[in-house]
Image (cartoon, grey):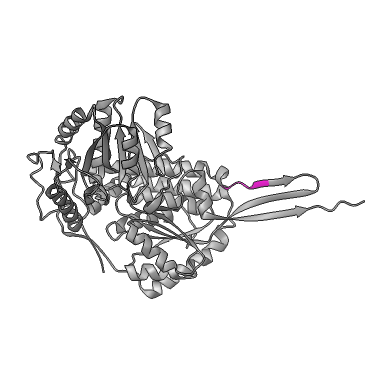
Amino acid sequence: MLKTVTPIDNTIYVEREFASTKTINETLDQSKKALIEWKSTSLETRKKILISFVENFLKNNLEIEEELCKQMGRPISQCGGEMNGFEERARYMIENSNIALENVISKKNNEFNNFITKEPLGTIFIIAPWNYPYNTSVNSIIPSLLSGNTVILKHSSQTPLCAEQLFKAAQKSNLPQGVFQFMHLDHESTSKIIADNRIDHVLFTGSVSGGKQVKRAIGERFINAGLELGGKDPAYVRKDCNLQHAIENLADGSFYNSGQSCCGIERIYVDSEIYDDFVDGIKNFTEKYILDDPLKKNTNLGPVVKLSAANFIRNQIKQAISEGATDIISKENFKISDNNNCYVSPSVLTNVNHSMKFMMEESFGPCVGIMKVSNENDAVKLMNDSPYGLTACIWTEDKEFAYNFGTKINTGTFFMNRCDYLDPGLAWTGVKDTGTGVTLSVLGFDHLTRAKSYHLRTIKED
């Protein structure tokens, strides 16, 4: 049985049976059967159906938001943001699918008509995470279906109701049977499905260890996988920045969703000339957060997803402090937090360095480390000193400097004066242990299709 424990009070919130071997085989067969008709369906028809899918999903927002809060602990006041993100990304991909999927013309004249089409890969197996369960899955589901693929979704065991809500919306939108399906799966069954010849591509968002398991399950099969894995995203606060704006936005980038974002800020490097002012400012701002039951409307910092995650974060912070770090945040306003629940008080650590695991390993919690730097060269060196590379950011008033600085940072996305944000028109990708592949933008479609070339010649009569 799948049992989802809510982090609000550590009670069982959802129970479901895992899919049986029979159900798995029927689902895979149905997906292949549905592929034949779906890939022959015109793009305009697919777009109309998927617009309906998005609209039907959004109509059920109140139920979805409450379920989301209870499944993973995000404050109810912030759950609507995920609905907005889902809609923004889905509509962008639908509206730009003609451009993304159009034929590439090589030669066209009276004798030759040579072009490349973008053909669907087949059945896409999507393994979605719990931390942004709708925003991450929409990145994969919508472009996969627009491209003519069929989709099987496996959602995290922490957020099984998200898969059910998406399927419910699909059923109301006249998606042909078998085009979009979901299953609740354990790890063993998930690996077997990845290894199955009826799967043509895998899209996984999760941990580095999970990405390695996906690669092992694929084995010698000649299919690819899109892997969005970990992050330890850095920020550089330059002395010419708008200091208050940097403080408030970097606090939000560190603590939103209780820091459980792969592109959340976990490392901040501050110019020595403004270091003390920045530290004082982020301390004062952070201590105003309200850590409480996420179902309360004034809560803006909820529990982390499970007790094991809470204990990992606490132990990582405790170890850093034993090695010389200082937590500058007073815990007076965060008394709900204790070692027997999922409520983790926010922490800002100073006197940290890169010999500490806290500054090198992903924390995935409401905590951030701050280091003083003398110049941009120091910042570049420290920002690149990481096994990850999803996003990075700079806070400055000099756009030219920001661009030149960004060219030196090993990252998938580089921001100036913002962080922890996604533009659906830009490619979402990473380097190093953050993974491989691209979602979003028109480039994301290229990873869900294969090129097929046509060389058509007309023989003229003499």
On the picture, is 457 further left or further right than 88?
right
**Nearer to me, 267 or 117:** 267
Residue 270 visible (yes or no):
yes
**Nearer to me, 64 or 283:** 283
User: Looking at the image, which residue is at 37% across and 51% down?
Assistant: 434
Residue 345, quarter of picture: top left
Which residue reaches farthest right?
Answer: 462
On the picture, is 403 further left or further right than 293?
right
**447 drawn magenta:** no
Residue 418 visible (yes or no):
no
Which residue reaches farthest bottom?
Answer: 22
**Nearer to me, 421 or 149:** 421
Residue 32 in percent (x, y) is at: 51, 66
**Nearer to me, 267 or 104:** 267
Residue 403 in percent (x, y) is at: 43, 32
The residue segment tinted magenta is 101-105
How many circles with numbers are drawn on the protein? 0
Is 112 above or below relative to 370?
Answer: below
Residue 254 in percent (x, y) is at: 25, 41
Question: Where, quadrant-wise, is the N terminus in this rendering?
Answer: bottom left
Residue 59 in percent (x, y) is at: 36, 45
User: Looking at the image, which residue is at 57% across and 63% down?
Assistant: 36
User: Looking at the image, which residue is at 43% across and 45% down?
Assistant: 428
User: Looking at the image, which residue is at 46% across and 47% down?
Assistant: 52
